Every structure is written in C-alpha cells, then in structure tokens.
Amino acid sequence: MHKINSPDGRDIEAMESTAPSRSDLATTTPGDSDANRRGGISLFTATCIVIANMIGTGIFTSLGFQVGDLPSGFTIVALWTLGGLCALCGALSYGELAATLQRSGGEYHFLSVIFHPVVGFVAGWLSITAGFAAPVALAAIAFGRYFNGFAPGVDATGLSIAVVVAVMVIHLCGVGIGSAFQNAATILKVSLVAALVVAGFSLGESQPISFLPSAIDGPLLASTPFAVSLIYVMYAYSGWNASTYIVGEVRHPGRTVPLSIAIGTLIVTVLYVGVNAAFLRSTPISEMAGKVEVAHVAAAHIFGPTGGRIMAALICGGLVSTISAMTWVGPRVAMAMGEDWRALRWLAIKNRTGVPTFAIVAQTILVVLLITLGSFDAVLTYVQFSLQLCSFLAVLGVIVLRFTRPELPRPYKTWGYPITPLIFLAVSAWMMGHILLEKPMESLSGLATLLVGAVVYWISVHRRTADRKQAGL
C-alpha cells in the first residue's frame, strides 16, 4: 500500500478509520512546517503566484460585459476600485487564517477547522471539480481567441487544449522548473499590463469620456447592472488568496503568505484600474460592448491593426502565466484532500520531485472537458457564485475563530479588524444576492455542485464507519 504523510508528519493510514476532526486538521502550528526548515517558496515567487492567479482572463475580457449597461467612465472606475477594495479586505483576512492554520489547501483546510470537516470538504470538492479547472479553461479559451487575432484561421479550441497540456508537462517536471517558468511568465504579464496603461493614455485618439462623477452615476452605482458587473470584476480579482493553497511549501509562511497576498492584491488593483481607464479613453464603448476579446479591440485602437495583432500575441503570453499558476495551485487542494480521505488518496501521490502527479493530470482532464463543452459566460457565472460563497465563509471564519479558538498563535492578525472582514462580507453578500436573482440557473448549478460534494462526504464517512465495524474496531 502506498503510504502518504500529511504535512505535520501523521501517516494517512492512521487517519483512514474515521473522518478527520477539526482538532486533527488544526495540529500544525506556526513555526513547525517543513518549509521553515528547508527553504521553500520565497516571498517573490509567492507574490508572483498571487499576481499570476489574479491577472488572467478577467482583465482582458470583463470590460466588454460591463460597458453596455454602465456607459460611464466614473462608474466603471468606481466598479474596479470597489472590487480591489473588496479583494484587499479579503486578502488581509485570509492572511490571518494562513498564518494561524499553516497547511496547504486553502478553504478546504480553513473551513474544516473553523466550522466542520463537511464544510471544508465541500469547499475542497468545489476547488477540485470546478474552482480551478473552470478558470484555467476560461484562460485557455481566451488564449485561443486572442491567438486567432494574431494568426487568423488557427483552430482556437485545439490551441487552447495544447497550451493546457504543455503547461501541465512543465509543472510535472518539478517545483524548481515550475517556479522559474512562473516567475518569468508573471514578469512578462505585469510588464504587458503596465505597457497597455501607458500606451492607452499616450497614444491613439482620446474618446469623449469623463472619469469625473456626473448626475447619471448615482443611479448607476445603485443599479442591478452594477451589482451584476461585480461578477466579472470579482472574477478578475479572484486569485488574491492563491498562496494560501500552498502554505506548506512556502518559506516562513506566517510572514510570507500574508505579505504575498497583500502586496499582490495592491499591485493588481492599481494595474486593473489603470488598464480599464486606458481602454475607455482609447476605444469607443460601442466597439467593446459584448466582446470577449476586448483587449484586442482596444489594442487595435491604441497601436493600429498591426500593433493590435502583436498585442494579441503578448496577451496570449500573459494568459499562459495564469494557466501555469492555477495548474500549480489547484492540485495542491486535491493533494491535501487526498492526504485526509481514503477515497481520494490517489490525488496525494507525488513523484520524486514532490509534485502531486495524479492531481495535476486529473485537473487537466477536467479543463479539457470544460474547454470542449462549456460556454465562456455560463462557466464564469457558474463558478464565480460558488467560489464567492466559499470565500465569504472563510472570511467569516476569521471572526468565528477569534471567539472559538482565541488561544491559537497568530503570527499575523488582520489589519483593520473587524472592519476589513465586515466590508468583504457586506460586498460579497450584496453581490451574491444579485447574482442569484439575475442568474438563477448558473447560481443554482454552482450550489448543486456543493450539494454533490456534501453527498460524497457523507458517503465517505459512512463507508469508513462500515469498514471499521466490519474490522471489529
């Protein structure tokens, strides 16, 4: 039998007889992780992972779904600023959870400890079935479409699948190779977005749009389209919690993880507000409305047709960074679940370089299925509602854990507590309410995925109980 060790040294065979309890899952304490003793992922790489997870398809595709109902420069800038503020409040809250509960797995580990293993299992189930596979699929779909802008006539679907498989192979080669590839791709991506901001304000013809508030902005800010547009904005900002999924591999996680998500979120917020303002200044709203490849449309206006094609190729390079980051992070959630659950044990199997081989391959297979079967808009809404709900529970868990486990060492405490988590909770609840009303089928599909996860959890628990009785334990 293949033996797998959990991050705090427990044999998984010792855990298989019962469902893991909250006390079992919370036994790792700050300062005792292997990453502290053996080096591990640096602050720079952890921040690159956060930035790469955040800057993906959202920034290159979201504006087209917003400008039709919100034809105001001030409202669009306010929308992206609010999204950045909300993401920063969430990041500051997650930093405390990561510093206190130092184990890879993100919401799977946090919610298992704070509430109940079934809550964490359901969050992990969402992560391994859709939470990372769907964003990777969206990034790959966008890659194919943008590459078509550079080289018309190329099979976009086939290209999307090819880039996903190629990135998978790179990460199967080891963490060192994956780190180098990730850092280089992220630097390229940040440089690209910064260049778009500068060029958007210095080149091309300026559009008749104002970024100062006007009489129409008040009703727009309180409108349903504004709330629904937060779906796309929060999707674009999603990934600010990326380094919490790999806590066990990070050097000095109590300090590095909170810093990486705070620094990464601040950098991305500045870039997002700047690039959307640049798009609005340089490109007519009528040409962007309803378009997925909105960055290509804007680049054509900024640089001309030839420059637009070149920019499309560069955007493809930036999307590879997103695919890479999620191919790295997502399987670590599956690995953590495999360490705790016998039915998922195969997901925790690593190769000689420490990479969870089967988890990476399984996620890639799901990505390929979504690329071939899913539509961009429906997949985005489906996954965003469910992921926002899990983030809501995790940030709520910061408050709950302060009351239920005050004795836990907290190397980092949430800045601005309790205001910062309450801001995130209020904005998230408001947004999820509007999503549920405006996109009921996609939202209910996301909830159905969570329900399936709960059913799988109870089946697993009952099977363990039956096995114990049969063994006479």
Image (spheres, grey):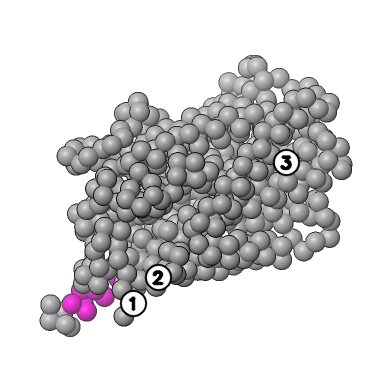
Q: Which amino acid does label 3 sit on?
A: Ala
Q: Can you identify the residue that label 3 sits on?
A: 295
84 vs 357, nearest the viewer: 357
- Image position of 201 (left or right of 121): right
The label shown at residue 70 is none
Q: Which of marks 3 and 2 is in front?
A: 2
- Image position of 287 (left or right of 415): right
Q: In this view, does 425 lie above or below 246?
A: above
**The N terminus lies in which quarter of the figure?**
bottom left
Could you tell me residue 464's position as x and y percent?
A: 24, 74
Q: How crowded is mark 3: few (under 14 residues within 10 Å), some or many (20 or more)?
A: many
The answer to whether the residue labelled 3 contacts the one labelled 2, judged by CB atoms less than 8 Å apart, is no
Q: Which residue is drawn at 70% across and 46% down?
A: 315
242 vs 80, nearest the viewer: 242
Q: Which of marks 3 and 1 is nearer the N terminus?
A: 1
Say what secondary structure mark 2 lies in: loop
Say what secondary structure mark 1 lies in: loop
Q: Residue at x 33, y 48 (%)?
A: 36
Could you tell me residue 319's position as x and y percent?
A: 64, 50
Q: Residues within 10 Å of mark 1 (few under 14, many from 20)?
A: few
Residue found at the far front of this picture: 38
Could you tell me residue 9's position as x and y percent?
A: 25, 61
Q: Residue at x 29, y 54 (%)?
A: 112
Q: Can you identify the residue that label 1 sits on?
A: 2
- Image position of 283 (left or right of 79): right
Inter-mark Cα distance, 3 to 1? 48 Å
Q: How many labels does the image show?
A: 3
Q: Is the magenta stretch mostly helix, strand or loop?
A: helix
Q: Can you identify the residue that label 2 sits on?
A: 349
Please give the range of residues in magenta. 459-468
Inter-mark Cα distance, 3 to 2? 40 Å
Q: What residue type is labelled 2?
A: Ile
